[in-house]
Amino acid sequence: MEVKSRMRRTASVAMVALMGLGLAACSAGEADTELNPDEISGEISLLTPIFEGSPGQDLLEDELLPQFYEEYPNVTVNVDYTTYGNLNEKLTTAVVSGLVPDVMLMGVGWIEAFADKGVLADLGELGLSEDTLKESYTDEIVEAGMWDGNVYAVPIMLDTRFGVARMDILKEAGYDSPPSSWEELIEIAEATTVRSSNGSLERAGFDMMSLDARQAFETILFSAGGELFNDDATAPAFNSDEGVAALGLMADLVNKYEVEDIGFTSTDDIVNPLINGRAAMGIAHNNLWTQAQEADPTVLDNLEPFVIQGEASGMFFGGTLATVANNSKNPQAARALLEFLSSPDAALAANEQRGNVPALTELLDSDYVQSNRFVQFAMENLDVAQREGGPSQWLEVRGDFAPAVQGALLGQKTPQEALDDLAALVQTAIDR
Amino acid sequence: MTTTERHPIRGAEAAAKQVSPSTAPKKRKRISTAEKKRRRAGWLMITPSVIHVGLWTLIPVIATFYLSFTDYGIFEAPKWIWFDNYVEMFNDAVFMQSIGNTVWYTFWTVPVSMAVAVVVAVLLNQGFKLQKFYRTAFFLPQVTATVAIAMVWLWIFNPQYGLLNAMLETLGIPGQAWLVDPQWALPAVILVGAWQGIGIKMLIYIAALQNIDESLYEAASLDGASSIRKFFSITVPMLKPATFFVFIISIIGAFQVFDQIYVLTDGGPANATTMMTYEVYRSAFQEFRMGMASAQSVVLFAFLLFVTLISRRVTKEED
């Protein structure tokens, strides 16, 4: 099965690579100025939080970079692998030491800080403009790579979070479709929660604990019609009535409706509770589909994605974007690599390896997307998806969200108190 | 033999001082040449260490003190802000909580692991068959990466599949969500810290035990002393110097706990297990506030200095 999967992937990559030859300058490559491969040379470094681990490294080094070298034979790429967990440290030490990698892959919400401080190159000056990008990506995704009206990053892949229901469990409880409102969500969650005779939880009606607390809150916040920050990102907006309602819902699901106990699942769980049936519904990452394919393909038919619907449609997206260092000694080579990594063939292969959502709209029709129900669902609903971030201080404050959410779930503070205290912290950081 | 007599350089100096005044100029010159050579050789030998300490310890320490008075966010040059970082830090409820957690962690891990270590050391110094195996087994956590250990403990503490809850259930005791319940998270982390610290302490105690004169035990046996009496009247007093040493290094180690927090709890839930070192890390690498991180490091340094000085004072006679 592993071999078949690999063969399929290789074939897919090869096919896309062939397509790529004819589309050499597609998507990000549809730049305002074309690169001449023969004139570009030099050694560049790539810092990447994706492609980590053996499968990722194999994909990058054995399949993708050889394609890049075919087109740019005079360029050498030195890869520095890391994970999102350690990217902060890598970037901090890189900036402090003045050895910023030529091409950096970073997350949604990261661009603002590094662009604001002049670490990233304005891609407009390298020939990539907002208008050309918006031809290939949705507006919200392009804006995730922009700061102060300029383009600093090109999207490669998206990580989305949305609701997922185990339809076999819901049907047993008498429900034919996932919830379409908060009220239905509570009702179904209560109906599908199972506790043993001594009261210990055996199945959560709605799981929020196997996801980062900040991202779970953001997803519910968006479904409440709330936003993280005001329009010009100068003040927090998550402690609005919508934010309090969102955190209130999360706290009530745990403490009032008791559809999940704290600690029942965690982000460290090896198998997602929706796969092994320990949860009837939950907020999940789009790669749950890939996880289920590997762990238990028999549940795939029972996994139903849904947008969490409150006052608005709640779907969250993060992602990985490619940037070029402002002080790169080989900016054209760096731009070439950026364009290559965000091109349809390379982006598709990277997304397939991680079970992620391609940022390029045109890839909706690809075999990979069509064969992955969650990715397809995410792409079809990207118009309602919202991202995190906003102010350039986002990286400074995002770590404060989880303790605040946990404090409310644990009943240490009311949702209003937790969010107001968090807002005060965030405002201090913005004003600093 | 005095310290001066033992020390080759100081010994030479003392000898030089004893030279009679009449012959002093001539002899001083001759000794001075030899002395110069010795000193030159001495300096040559310690130069690598001096460079190492200067580069990797002294300069960073001075830089830390300097940066603690600045607003330094890595992207721009440090800006001098006097005591603003310190004022903000001591008004930060989370950092104050981290100080409390660190002291609480130290308070429990150090004595518990020391007590267990001394008992284990005594047991593993009896000369029985599998002694070497057990010594290795107890020391193993010390040489195993904390991240790997923490991963194992993550599994042990897992509320659903974890070994700990499974064991408790067999005894009819309800399991807990050890690492996500604020009541249990810190005790769980303390347990891991205490367990991991036993190995090195045991090793030091074994070394100390082997230096205790056997005749003391023989004499006590002749006087009819029981094993427990011998332990408390001979072993424990004779281990005093080792105990003070272990105490100091354990406190320093406990105050610097980081990796197990990083892997096990990420400082949560709701900051229940955050420590001073973890806050330093968060300030530096999550918030990019190097000035604040430096100020927090200075406070950590001050804590360690204070504890060490107190201990030095207490152990002055033993030294």
Image (cartoon, coloured by chain):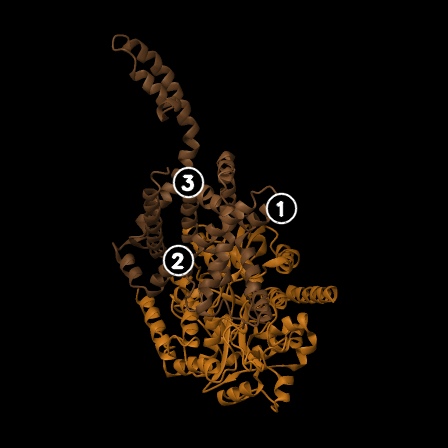
Identify the mark nearer the N-term, 1 or 3.
Answer: 1
Query: Could you tell me how far apart the alpha carbons at marks 2 and 1 are, in whole angstroms?
Result: 34 Å
Can residue A383 be seen at all in this image of the molecule?
yes
SS state under label 2: helix
For the C terminus of chain A, the quadrant is bottom left
Query: Which is closer to the viewer, label 3 or label 2?
Result: 3
Up/down of A262 relative to A99, above or below = below
Front residue of A333 and B143: B143
> Viewed as shown, does residue A366 lie left or right of B25?
right
- Identify the subunit bearing mark 2: B
Residue A191 appears at what percent x and percent y? 56, 88
Number of other residues with Cα within 10 Å of mark 1, as a class: few under 14, some 14 to 19, many 20 or more: few
Q: Which chain is orange?
A: A
* First of labels 2, 1 by sequence position: 2
Q: Which chain is brown?
A: B
Cα gap from disc 3 to disc 2, whole angstroms? 26 Å
Q: Secondary structure at mark 3?
A: helix
Name the residue that disc number 1 marks. Answer: B133
The answer to which of A62 and B57 lies nearer the viewer is B57
Q: Amino acid at mark 1?
A: Phe
User: How far from the left and from the top, in percent, is residue B254?
Assistant: 43, 53
Q: Nearer the viewer, residue A107 or B148?
A: B148
Query: CB of mark 2 within 8 Å of CB of mark 1?
Result: no
User: Residue B241's mark?
Assistant: 3
Judged from the image, the secondary structure of the residue bearing numbered disc 1 is: helix
How many labels were placed on the picture? Answer: 3
